[in-house]
Image: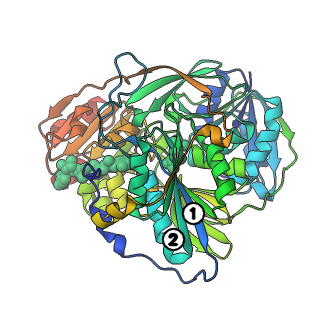
Amino acid sequence: MARNGHLSRQRRHTVTVIETNDFTLEGTPMKVLVPVKRVLDYNVKPRVKADGTGVDLANVKMSMNPFDEIAVEEAIRLKDKGVTEIVVVSIGEQKSQETLRTALAMGADRAILVVSETKVEPLGVAKILAKIVEEEKPDLVILGKQAIDDDNNQTGQMLAGLLNWGQGTFASKVEIADGSVNVTREVDGGAETDTLKLPAIITTDLRLNEPRYASLPNIMKAKSKPMAQKTPADFGVDVTPRLTTLKVVEPAKRSAGIKVADVDALVGKLKEMGVAK
Amino acid sequence: MKTLVWVEHDGQAVKDATLSAVTAASQLGEVHLLVVGQGVDGVAGEAAKIAGVGKVHVADDAAFAHALAENVAPLIVELMASHDAFVAPSTTHGKNIAPRVAALLDVMQISDILSVESEDTFTRPIYAGNAIATVQSTDAKKVITVRGTAFAKAATEGGSGEIEAVASTGDKGLSTFAGSEIAKNERPELTSAKIIVSGGRALASSDQFHAMIDPLADKLGAGVGASRAAVDAGYAPNDYQVGQTGKIVAPEVYVAVGISGAIQHLAGMKDSKVIIAINKDEDAPIFQVADIGLVGDLFKIVPELTAKL
Ligand SMILES: Cc1cc2nc3c(=O)[nH]c(=O)nc-3n(C[C@H](O)[C@H](O)[C@H](O)COP(=O)(O)OP(=O)(O)OC[C@H]3O[C@@H](n4cnc5c(N)ncnc54)[C@H](O)[C@@H]3O)c2cc1C
Ligand SMILES: Nc1ncnc2c1ncn2[C@@H]1O[C@H](COP(=O)(O)O)[C@@H](O)[C@H]1O
């Protein structure tokens, strides 16, 4: 399937070992919404288009944003802790169906595709998601901390602001408690834990979990899981971009330097640079 | 343009990242600062001395003690009634707060800017810095986060900002701070270190990471970083991670030890002035960006290098 490009997934086999917590959530069924974005696969080297309008996405491998795989995985793991339904949402071109199918094959229950063939910025995405939240009433929305195409790192925080919910960004650990969620966050200098009232927003960091691969039977099963189609207009959201991209260029190139033969030569260089005495 | 800069601090001192944000803001116009926290008189006094600063708004309240976005964003939104732009450093706190402010103001944030081209036009990296976009904002107010390595630090002396207390907007009751584990680190902070030594997966264990990397860093007076692989494997703490999704650094000298040079890692360090790579694979991509490369076994090279410095 579409995953064979992933190289550093050695730790993925650990998914069967699911950490359990002391508490249970009997009688409190929870619903989780997970927004997922289709992006250039992280193993593909981005190429800037010659006309300076953007990055070339024609005929290149596209995948689910890696942070969103982590978000889907986390939602699935929470199924042991009271989560009864996982709804995945993508806003983008028709081809985002593939991304949603991947999420369904991993274990999500139902998908919503909000079709827009033109780019929707995080603010527009957050507004659409806020409308979906009004309809679906999830207890948690788990997003990736950043989409690795535009590297914005905004959508989760924006959605939390629009909904007036708590936000646990850059999560490395999530623990549901009664009516609240404890989120350990990767922050400069170390880790911070915040307790958020439910419903709440979480955005995932790399070390939250190791996403599973979908098994073949589950990929087959995913084909018959429900996928609704909507448009931004269905939600009454104006997605006109607020930012205009004037041009996209390659960064200044670094050229390879020299190789030195041994440590003495390296020390010599460091001395020349005044780094070593 | 009147710009409000969020001051990042640890309760005691202004963090360096703020100083780069001030420089970016000064390119937009008049710079006002916002110091939010609990017991922040000292920080406010320090902030007022930053060169070129006008007013320093100070909001002192227990609700602000831990810079929770849920409590801080509404305060900023109120202050934005009299400012044209909000600027925060691209630190974890800045990235947490600014988009919430942007959404409440109905503004599309411009993340991680590298330059100010004009009042409404900026450059920013996309695709892990493999492309640089020039973007123009059509929003009336701007919300911006600033990449620290792209702007010089404003001088910490010479300013005489006027300190003005702001009423608290209170605790919104959505979140509480439950604790933190902030590592005590004697070494220079990564984002401001002049020299950085980073270790990768090749270090193979936490013990070896510390046995190899720490003494070399000590000799050089360097900060210590790591690749994602090293952090994921538990050889180094998460806040050591350099890269697209970790810290962005640009020291005078960056020494990559046993790091292959994946694009996500390069995204965080390729603006370093001099890059030195030690790797046993002569074809490792890191050598494509390294100024000085040494091919060989790090377990031999690093101790020898440390001894000879
Ligand atoms: C969404 C996403 C975000 C990411 N963000 C980041 C990020 O922010 N930062 C980051 O670093 N990575 C990030 N990555 C991971 C990145 O793709 C690479 O997997 C990672 O950088 C590899 O780390 P490494 O170079 O230490 O390990 P490897 O790629 O395994 O390289 C190890 C190197 O050590 C060399 N070596 C082995 N033994 C020795 C020896 N004895 N002596 C000398 N050399 C030796 C090998 O030749 C090899 O080149 C991200 C990935 C994804 C998908
Ligand atoms: N078009 C989209 N469709 C679905 N989810 C999205 C979309 N854009 C962003 N997201 C979500 O928001 C997260 C952060 O994205 P960003 O703010 O663009 O960096 C992603 O990891 C996704 O979970």
Q: Chain of mark 2?
A: A
- Asked if residue B158 is positioned above or below residue A159 in the image, the reply reads above
What SS does tag 1 mark? Answer: strand
Pointers 1 and 2 in contact (CB under 8 A)?
Answer: yes
Residue denoted by label 2: A78
Residue denoted by label 1: A32
Q: Is mark 1 within 8 Å of ligand 2?
A: no
Percent position (x, y) of residue A96? 43, 44
Percent position (x, y) of residue A29? 61, 74
Q: Are marks 1 and 2 on the same chain?
A: yes
Of B185 and B218, nearer the camera is: B185
Q: What's the CA distance linking mark 1 and mark 2?
A: 9 Å
* Amino acid type of the residue that numbered disc 1 sits on in the rendered structure: Val
Quadrant of the rendering where the N terminus of chain B is positioned: top right
On screen, residue B79 versus residue A16, left or right, reads right
**Residue B107 sits in quarter:** top right
User: Taking the image as drawn, is residue B12 in sight?
Assistant: no
* Amino acid type of the residue that numbered disc 2 sits on in the rendered structure: Leu
Q: Residue placed at 14% from the left, 45% from the top? A: B281
